[in-house]
Amino acid sequence: MLHMPARSTWVWLVDAALAEDLGPGDATSLAVLPEGLTGSARIEARTSLVVAGLAVAQEVFERCGTAFEALAADGDLLDPASVLAEVSGEALGILSAERTALNFLQRLSGIATLTHAYCDAIRGTRAEIIDTRKTTPGWRQLEKYAVRCGGGGNHRMGLFDGILIKDNHIAAVGSIGSAVKLARTGGARGLKVRVEVESVEAAREAIDAGADALLVDNQPPRTISEIVALAGGRLRIEASGGVTLESVAEIARTGVDEISVGALTHSAPAADIALEWNPISSG
């Protein structure tokens, strides 16, 4: 089951986004729309997409005094022309909220849709698609939620909830063995120790030092396969670095447990979603 991040982790983004867009007020709507004019509109998918961010869009519309009814759920795969939600109330509120709400929906649904495509590409293998920390500053909770909506998993939420010894840590202390030993003795209790490696020899050193997991970075499938064989199921193996939709299936077939894809959050195109005004009924 999908669980939205706590409201407190993202509601401030809604505050900032509305303040940024509205300023002292929607000048066009205030000039054009008769006071008290009411109506309704639908939020439509213009292409196939996976939905994410409906609760955030609802928050935006409700801040502008507009009623919001979701007609889909986060995680749903929709066809073009499907309706995600209906909004109703004063026209001023609907049109003042439109762009901000769509910005959230398009960004988050774009991440969910791209994640779904990666998950589809490796279906039938043991691998799981996971994200990285390459997120938009301030949006991490929402963007990682969108990855889950698309069927992917989350890596570390931040630097605080996992130990990942990377190349610069190793360079700073002199060796993989030293870095793992220091992590074991000085690291927070209960955190697994994952080590980034770029060769079979480095993987062997990390395994011998007692690493819990390996991140194989920027290596061809042949090297990844050799490291998977070396580990022999004793620890989890993650592949990372330059993963694309064209290459991910071959990487998954090496037998890795996880494939981390930075593009899910740093390069996902916005989903094509629009708000369309409902025609006035003739009676």
Image (cartoon, rainbow, N blue to C red):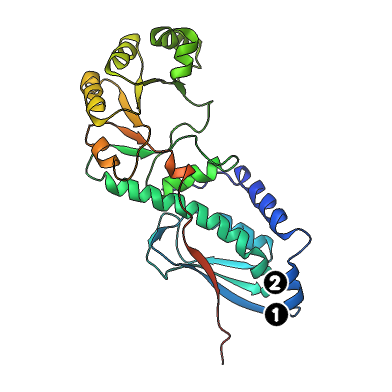
Q: Residue at x 51, y 57 (%)?
A: 106
Q: Is residue 73 placed above or below 133 in the rendered structure?
A: below
Q: Is residue 110 placed above or below 244 in the rendered structure?
A: below
Q: Residue at x 52, y 67 (%)?
A: 274
Q: Is residue 235 visible?
A: yes
Three-letter amino acid code at the position of disc 2: Leu
Mark on residue 127? none
Q: Identify the image quadrant of the C terminus.
A: bottom right
**Which of 265/146 is in front?**
265
**Mark 2 surroundings within 10 Å by alpha-carbon count, few (fewer than 14), some (14 through 19), many (20 or more):** many
Pointer 2: what residue? Answer: 92
Left or right position of 218 against 97:
left
Location of residue 42 in the rendering, given as x and y in whole percent from the top left corner: 53, 72
Mark on residue 37? 1
Direction right: furthest residue: 24
Q: Are marks 1 and 2 in contact (CB under 8 Å)?
A: yes
Location of residue 44 in the rendering, given as x and y in whole percent from the top left corner: 48, 68
Element assignment for label 2: helix
Three-letter amino acid code at the position of disc 1: Leu
Element assignment for label 1: loop
Q: Residue at x 58, y 85 (%)?
A: 280
Q: Is residue 155 placed above or below 40 in the rendered structure?
A: above
**Which of 153/200 is in front?**
200
Q: Residue at x 65, y 73 (%)?
A: 89
Left or right position of 98 against 226:
right
Direction bottom: furthest residue: 283
Left or right position of 64 against 253:
right
Location of residue 108 in the rendering, given as x and y in whole percent from the top left corner: 50, 52
Location of residue 47 in the rendering, given as x and y in whole percent from the top left corner: 41, 64
**Mark 1 surroundings within 10 Å by alpha-carbon count, few (fewer than 14), some (14 through 19), many (20 or more):** few
